[in-house]
Image (spheres, rainbow, N blue to C red):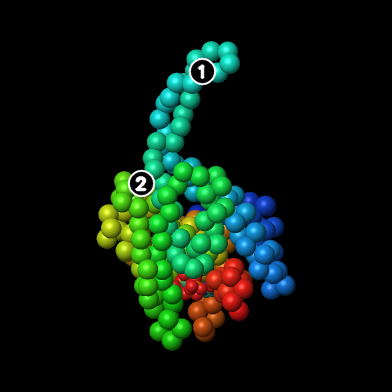
Amino acid sequence: MPTNFSTLNVINHPLIKHKLATLRDKKTDTLGFRSRLNEIASLMVYEITRDLPTRIITVETPLEITECEVINKAITLVPILRAGLGMVEGILQLMPNARVGHIGLYRDEDTLEPVEYYKKFPADMPDSKIIVIDPMLATGGSAAAALNFIKQCGGRDISFVCLVAAPMGVKRLIADHPDIPIYTAAFDRELNKFAYILPGLGDAGDRIYGTE
Ligand code: PRP
Ligand code: URA
């Protein structure tokens, strides 16, 4: 990986790699795809939340009173519709109190530019830790637009989480949003002429929802 991809974090773990192999396999059916995707999302949470602030509370154990640390920041998940929804349940399993905002974007097949069709954020999102979710970072157009919307709504502490990233998308995000850490399970080779990631896993939304 080029060393100047400063905000890119590739989460290397055998369990994630194993499950990603299933997602890449074109023979994996919709149910298998959805399940493995959510499992990987759960596994990624550990790294994504590593820097969350904590505060001290007092807890009474069966034996004595002690000090413990608990998370001290609200968390907002923002999946980019549709495919981002495919990772939300897996993340919520570990962070059930997180709120969920939504951004609806699709990539115009001719221009490859993102088109917004829906947006709804929790009122307290600006003060929360915001985790923007989309399995695929291809040209980076959708992610860059989503991050612009969130910043316009006051979001400051933001991370972007995907499953597979392509060099072009990472470069675009680093250029447009150098303040935002990117987490991915895989850093793939390139895009094809239709801006699909190679080797990739195909159209994530279609594979999650069986709309191929
Ligand atoms: C896919 C994917 C990203 C986008 C990535 O969504 O989920 O949102 O493409 O491509 P980009 O980095 O070049 O913008 P798509 O537009 O296919 O919509 P969908 O999630 O509704 O299927
Ligand atoms: N969107 C997808 O779903 N897959 C790709 O490979 C690129 C964009």
Could you tell me which residue is drawn at 55 percent across and 44 percent down? 94
Judged left or right of residue 64, residue 116 is left
Residue where numbered disc 2 is placed = 128
Label 2 is placed on what type of residue? Ser
Q: Secondary structure at mark 1?
A: strand
Specify the quadrant of the image occupied by residue 163. Answer: bottom right
- The numbered mark at residue 202 is none
Could you tell me which residue is drawn at 59 percent across and 68 percent down? 208
Determine the residue located farthest toward the top in the rendered image: 64
Judged left or right of residue 38, residue 114 is left
Is residue 81 visible in the rendered image? The answer is: yes
Could you tell me which residue is drawn at 36 percent across and 61 percent down? 120
**How many numbered marks are there?**
2
Vertical order, 39 against 54 (above or below):
below
Of mark 1 and mark 2, the one earlier in the sequence is: 1
Judged left or right of residue 154, residue 117 is right
Is residue 200 visible in the rendered image? The answer is: no
Specify the quadrant of the image occupied by residue 100. Answer: bottom left
Foreground disc of the pair 1, 2: 1
Label 1 crowd bin: few (<14), some (14–19), many (20+), radius 10 Å:
few
Label 2 crowd bin: few (<14), some (14–19), many (20+), radius 10 Å:
many
Q: Position of residue 46 (x, y in %)?
A: 54, 45
How far apart are the two marked residues, 1 and 2, measured between alpha carbons?
Answer: 29 Å
- The numbered mark at residue 60 is 1
